[in-house]
Image: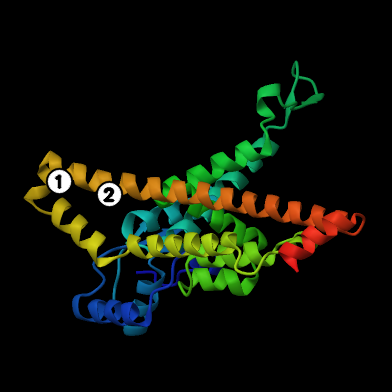
Amino acid sequence: MNTDFIINEEFARLIPPLSSEELDKLEQSLVNEGCLNPLIVWNNTIIDGHHRYAICIKHGISFNIIEKPELETELDVKLWMINNQFSRRNLPTEIRVALAYRFKEFEAERAKERMQATQFKEVDNTASTVLYTPQINDQKPENTEKGRALEAIAKKAGVSHTTAFQYDKIQQQGTEEQKAKVAEGKSSINKVYTEIKQAKQSEEERKVIHLKIKGSGVVVIQKYVSGIYNELEDFNTSKDLTGIRHALLNSYLGQKENFLACIHNIDKHKKLVTRNLTALSESVEDLELTVNQGKHIIRLEAQKDKKISKIYERYYG
């Protein structure tokens, strides 16, 4: 049997890494029981089973393979690999969102390639070509396209639209260190997003913020909103939620409509809380900006009018 297969590093990086404990368990299982699941191969390249392949080579364990000739391009392979990860592993929220994000990028790349391939076409069997011209309904606003893309990412990852939006901002505006914190599970998406949002304030906004009254209620509200966000993220993986789901869905209780309705209502209320928190957070930001703009205007007028200057000093010192 041929055991000399290619490891494509770009393909390998698509696979969420195993912890040292998971690797040890996998190695022990392969040594004791053999390689029960076949490796998946495309063009003599491993596309599923990188860890198993390395362990089998190390210990001389035989294995079977399944080839995927129906995958035509590397983009097809990448899309298949990501879908395969979703179907086979119980992945943390951050990993699911990252995979869904990459999946959408690869889909867009494939669509672009197909568009370029059909951009010119023959007319009347002559050598002349015509350039594809977008129709009016093809020219959708960028924010609508972006919103739909994020909705697709959220749906595939099984998270809220807000989480997908925040992850996108991290990828677009975050530092490599911040991206790594999320990728390695060292920080939640919401926490890193909050860091970026605070760091990206414009210089003009910073000047206005300096006019805040000490102990501003807006600041306090935002801290509470962020705290609730973080608690909600923790709740997604809490023992309570996991235990309820396991008990209701994996026993005879899962056959009864009232228990299934309980699970449905938990998910419904989680989404409702997240959506309302997002609206509240955005409204508080608008309130903060408006109040600070008002204070900024008064400060400027105080320099011209003695009466306003006295009022300004009375309240803001």
Mark 1 neighbour density, 10 Å: few (under 14) some (14–19) many (20 or more): some
81 vs 209, nearest the viewer: 209
In what quadrant of the picture does the C terminus appear? bottom right
Where disc 2 sits, the SS reads: helix
Q: Residue furthest left?
A: 252
Front position in the image: 105 or 243: 243
- What residue would you read off at disc 2? 266
Disc 2 residue type (three-letter)? Ile
In the image shown, does 24 or 272 lie closer to the viewer? Answer: 272
Q: Please report the residue visible at 65 percent of the width from the left and 58 percent of the height from the top.
A: 172
Q: Nearer the viewer, residue 111 or 30?
A: 111
Mark sitting on residue 259: 1
Please tell me in which quadrant of the rendered image residue 233 appears: bottom left
User: Is 134 placed above or below 13 here?
Assistant: above
The percent coordinates of residue 27 (x first, y second) are 29, 80
Can residue 77 be seen here? The reply is no
Callout 2 crowding tier (Cα within 10 Å): few <14, some 14–19, many ≥20: few
Left or right placement of residue 125 versus residue 248 in this view: right
> Which quarter of the figure has residue 2?
bottom left
Does residue 299 appear to the left or right of 95 in the view shown? right
Relative image position of residue 167 (x, y in whole percent): 54, 58
Q: Residue at point 48% right, 63% down? A: 224
Q: Farthest right residue?
A: 304
Quick one: quadrant of the N terminus? bottom left
